[in-house]
């Protein structure tokens, strides 16, 4: 009898229902390879999710303390999803760290968001800051069909840059903010030690636009968050927007506000 009960317990623990443990802003949601944290609008009006990759030496826990970004996301009726890196970093092509198959991990994240909270690709926006923005760019390149848009700050591809053919054609509509005075991740990129190199923002953007079949001859200027931005409106899935400001290495809630609105997620 005891052996039978133990077997039943083991089966229950292995079931999808038992695996769906309670989680939220202060308790990690476990998925294969890691975890994420999630916060919801207090009024219960949830129209999608903003999946955010933190900067260097960050964590999902620390990202939840970035209250201006969290509050702005919730104001747009989106759940705020803080994804947890490994030891503060991300593993993508050219990254200084190789600790996890991020493509598989992020695929599991999207699967869990769909199964647990019913967030389908048309309701998901991806984003990130610095090396986390780079992770968002590689996610858009590799799994762009799983998101409706992206808003990123101060980070792009790393060298060697991917070829357009390395990316899916379903690049989501995007808004990228980058500072002309950024010395941490300069627009032209920079060397990190002897073996790694951040990529050039303009070359990275050209790769995304080429793969998304953007007609750059149609580039126009629009104002997003008080910044004059270059907008290519006729890509396969929507606009490709680059916003250059005169500040340094930072992400601001006001820019996120404007970026989400441009992508069709208003307050």
Image (spheres, rainbow, N blue to C red):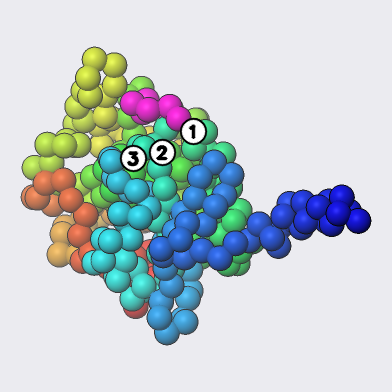
The residue sitting at 47% across, 76% down in the picture is 46
First to last magenta residue range: 92-99
Residue holding disc 3: 88
Measured Cα–Cα span from mark 2 to mark 3: 5 Å
Q: Outermost residue toward the bottom? A: 43
Q: Is disc 2 in contact with disc 3, using a CB cutoff of under 8 Å?
A: yes
* 232 in magenta: no
Mark 1 element type: loop
Task: Determine the residue positioned at 25% across, 55% down.
Answer: 220
Residue that carries the numbered disc 1 in the rendered image: 100
Please state the horizontal and vertical placement of residue 215, each as a whole percent of the image: 38, 46
Q: Position of residue 47 (x, y in %)?
A: 48, 74
Residue 89 visible? The answer is yes
Q: Earlier in the sequence, mark 1 or mark 3?
A: 3
Mark toward the start of the polypeptide (2 vs 1): 2
On-image quarter of the N terminus: bottom right
Circles 2 and 1: CB atoms closer than 8 Å: yes
Q: Which of 47 and 95 lies nearest the eye of the viewer?
A: 95
Q: Is residue 59 above or below residue 37?
A: above
Question: Which residue is depicted at the point 35% across and 55% down?
Answer: 61
How many other residues sit within 10 Å of disc 1, few (<14), some (14-19) or many (≥20)?
some
In the rendered image, the residue lying farthest to the top is 194
| SS of the residue under disc 3 | loop
Image coordinates of residue 76 in percent, x first then y, are 36, 74
Q: Does the rendering let one see residue 145? A: no
Q: Is residue 46 left or right of residue 253?
A: right
**Could you tell me how far apart the alpha carbons at marks 1 and 3 are, in whole angstroms?**
12 Å
Q: Position of residue 119 (x, y in %)?
A: 56, 64
Question: Which residue is the extreme one toward the front?
Answer: 2
Label 2 belongs to which residue?
86
Look at the numbered discs 1 and 3 and tell me whether their residues touch, using CB distance below 8 Å. Answer: no
Q: CA distance from mark 2 to mark 1?
A: 8 Å
């Amino acid at each position: 009898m005891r052996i039978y009960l133990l077997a039943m317990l083991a089966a229950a623990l292995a079931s999808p229902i038992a695996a769906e443990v309670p989680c939220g802003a202060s308790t990690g949601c476990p998925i294969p390879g890691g975890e994420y944290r999630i916060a919801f609008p207090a009024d219960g009006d949830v129209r999608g999710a903003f999946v955010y990759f933190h900067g260097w030496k960050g964590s999902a826990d620390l990202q939840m303390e970035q209250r201006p970004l969290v509050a702005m996301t919730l104001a747009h009726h989106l759940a705020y999803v803080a994804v947890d890196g490994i030891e503060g970093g991300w593993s993508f092509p050219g990254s200084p760290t190789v600790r996890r198959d991020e493509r598989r991990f992020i695929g599991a994240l999207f699967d869990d968001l769909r199964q647990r909270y019913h967030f389908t690709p048309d309701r998901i926006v991806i984003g990130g800051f610095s090396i986390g923005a780079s992770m968002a760019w590689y996610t858009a390149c590799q799994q762009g069909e799983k998101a409706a848009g992206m808003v990123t700050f101060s980070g792009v591809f790393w060298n060697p840059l991917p070829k357009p053919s390395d990316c899916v054609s379903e690049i989501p509509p995007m808004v990228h903010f980058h500072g002309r005075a950024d010395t941490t991740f300069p627009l032209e990129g920079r060397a990190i030690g002897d073996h790694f190199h951040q990529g050039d923002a303009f070359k990275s953007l050209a790769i995304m636009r080429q793969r998304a079949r953007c007609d750059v001859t149609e580039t126009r200027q629009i104002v997003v968050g008080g910044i004059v931005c270059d907008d290519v409106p006729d890509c396969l899935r929507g606009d490709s927007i680059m916003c250059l400001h005169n500040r340094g290495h930072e992400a601001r809630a006001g820019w996120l506000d404007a970026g989400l609105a441009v992508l069709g997620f208003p307050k």
